[in-house]
Image: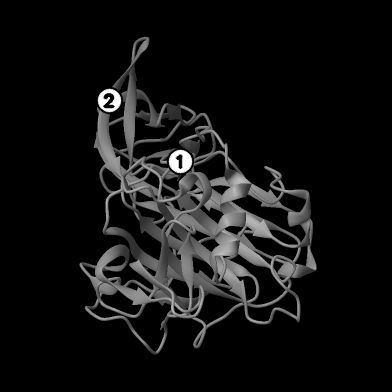
């Protein structure tokens, strides 16, 4: 994304022709099994699932077959814990999620009053609850330490917090045939039902859009907000949970992106831009991350400055995250890593502000009248850690 049509055209040109490639649903399933210390005829099963799933199935081996025992919902940290009843003897369990399963774990109940665990891997105490702060459960960094919250908005009220958010009014998106002007109006920017709602819609009376040319008007308006006046950060973890409008017709474009506080006297793209997620209705199953810098002159390079295989179905809630340091930038969709950049480009060694945008599309994603309007991008939360 960028202030003005030109950037929208550039960004979409980078992904023009990308075909959907499904990402793995689950990266890892773990399971710990131990006899419950207070009730020796029960087995405590706990673990974690990494990936875009909400539950895990506990299975028990019966002869050569695995039989479902219980389905357990995951908590906000993708962890689970459940206690199951068992009789005296040896029992083998495993956890299954999205066609991936953990290593089988075995426990032996030796008597009604005492039990000694026998396991195929070391048994440890059940995982302790993850510490929380203003952002909720604190995610872990790669080194095992915890991220600390620096910004959080769950949009639980009924109005946008203007002390934290700025509504854009000098910004356009779309193509020359159909472009939308950003306006500050509840019809395109509002908070309700637990989310920030950014829309693009038509208006009966065309509105001025002088950013295009003096005296220009358009019948399309849209919503964009940023933390330009209140918050910026260099490095850290940025995460948002977003749902867009379900359609495969061209014309809709949504973005969760970062813009530099100081452009350093450079023009875009040399000044920098970090697109955590851009979604285009013409590609209804994908999200596109993108790192904009001087390297844009070499075009889109999957695996370096963009990715064409980040699965994110339109019309459903998806979680997009960025983990950013001086030497490594990594993008996640629903917990799945889909782009890592280790170029240490100095373009990204400065503070940026988060921006959320509902837009009209351009190029092969230009609005042609078939995509439903109004279209709305719902944002469940934005959280930032350091």
Q: Which mark is residue 68?
A: 2
Q: Quadrant of residue 347?
A: bottom right
Residue 134 visible = no
The vertical placement of 98 against 237, above or below, is: above
Residue indicated by mark 1: 283
Q: Name the element at disc 2.
A: strand
Residue 268 vs residue 367, the one in the foreground? 367
Residue toward you, 289 or 368: 368
Residue at 44% from the left image edge and 74% from the top image edge: 216
Q: Position of residue 105 (x, y in %)?
A: 45, 30
Quarter containing the N terminus: bottom right
Q: Residue at x 33, y 24 (%)?
A: 60
The residue under the point 51% across, 35% down is 23
Q: Quadrant of residue 62?
A: top left
Instruction: Give the residue displayed 49% in from the left and 80% down from the top.
Output: 214
Are the residues tagged 2 and 1 within 8 Å (C-beta)? no
Q: Is residue 369 left or right of residue 297?
A: left
Q: Position of residue 273 (x, y in %)?
A: 64, 66
Label 2 and label 1: CA atoms lie apart by 37 Å
Within 10 angstroms of label 2, few (less than 14), some, or many (20 or more) residues?
some
Judged from this view, the residue extending furthest toward the top is 64
Task: Tell me how the rendering is colored.
Answer: one colour
Label 1: element kind: loop
């Amino acid at each position: 994304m960028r202030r003005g049509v030109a950037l929208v055209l550039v960004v979409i040109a980078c992904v023009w022709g990308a075909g959907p490639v499904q990402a793995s649903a689950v990266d890892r399933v773990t399971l710990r099994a131990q006899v419950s210390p207070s009730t020796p005829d029960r087995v405590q099963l706990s673990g974690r699932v990494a990936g875009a799933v909400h539950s895990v199935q506990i299975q028990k081996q019966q002869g050569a077959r695995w039989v479902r025992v219980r389905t357990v919902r995951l908590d906000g940290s993708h962890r689970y814990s459940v206690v199951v009843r068992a009789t005296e003897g040896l029992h083998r369990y495993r956890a299954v999620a999205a066609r991936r399963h953990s290593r089988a774990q075995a426990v032996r109940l030796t008597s009604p009053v005492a039990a000694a665990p026998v396991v195929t891997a070391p048994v440890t105490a059940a995982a302790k609850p993850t510490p929380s702060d203003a952002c909720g459960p604190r995610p872990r960094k790669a080194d095992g330490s915890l991220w600390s919250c620096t910004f959080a908005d769950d949009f639980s009220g009924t109005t946008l917090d203007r002390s934290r958010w700025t509504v854009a009014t000098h910004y356009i998106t779309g193509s020359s045939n159909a472009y939308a002007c950003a306006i500050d109006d509840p019809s395109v920017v509002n908070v309700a039902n637990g989310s920030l709602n950014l829309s693009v819609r038509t208006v009966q009376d065309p509105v001025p859009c002088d950013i295009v040319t003096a005296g220009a008007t358009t019948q399309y308006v849209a919503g964009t907000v940023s933390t330009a006046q209140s918050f910026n950060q260099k490095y850290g973890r940025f995460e948002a949970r977003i749902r867009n409008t379900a359609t495969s017709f061209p014309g809709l474009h949504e973005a969760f992106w970062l813009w530099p506080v100081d452009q350093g006297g450079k023009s875009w793209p040399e000044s920098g831009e970090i697109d955590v997620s851009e979604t285009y209705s013409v590609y209804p199953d994908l999200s596109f991350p993108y790192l904009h810098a001087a390297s844009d002159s070499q075009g889109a390079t999957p695996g370096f400055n963009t990715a064409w295989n980040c699965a994110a179905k339109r019309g459903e809630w998806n979680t997009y995250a960025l983990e950013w340091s001086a030497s490594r930038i990594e993008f996640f969709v629903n917990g799945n890593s889909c782009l890592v950049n280790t170029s240490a480009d100095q373009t990204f060694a400065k503070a940026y502000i988060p921006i959320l945008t509902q837009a009209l599309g351009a190029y092969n994603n230009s609005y042609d009248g078939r995509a439903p309007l109004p279209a709305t991008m719902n944002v469940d939360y934005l959280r930032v850690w350091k």
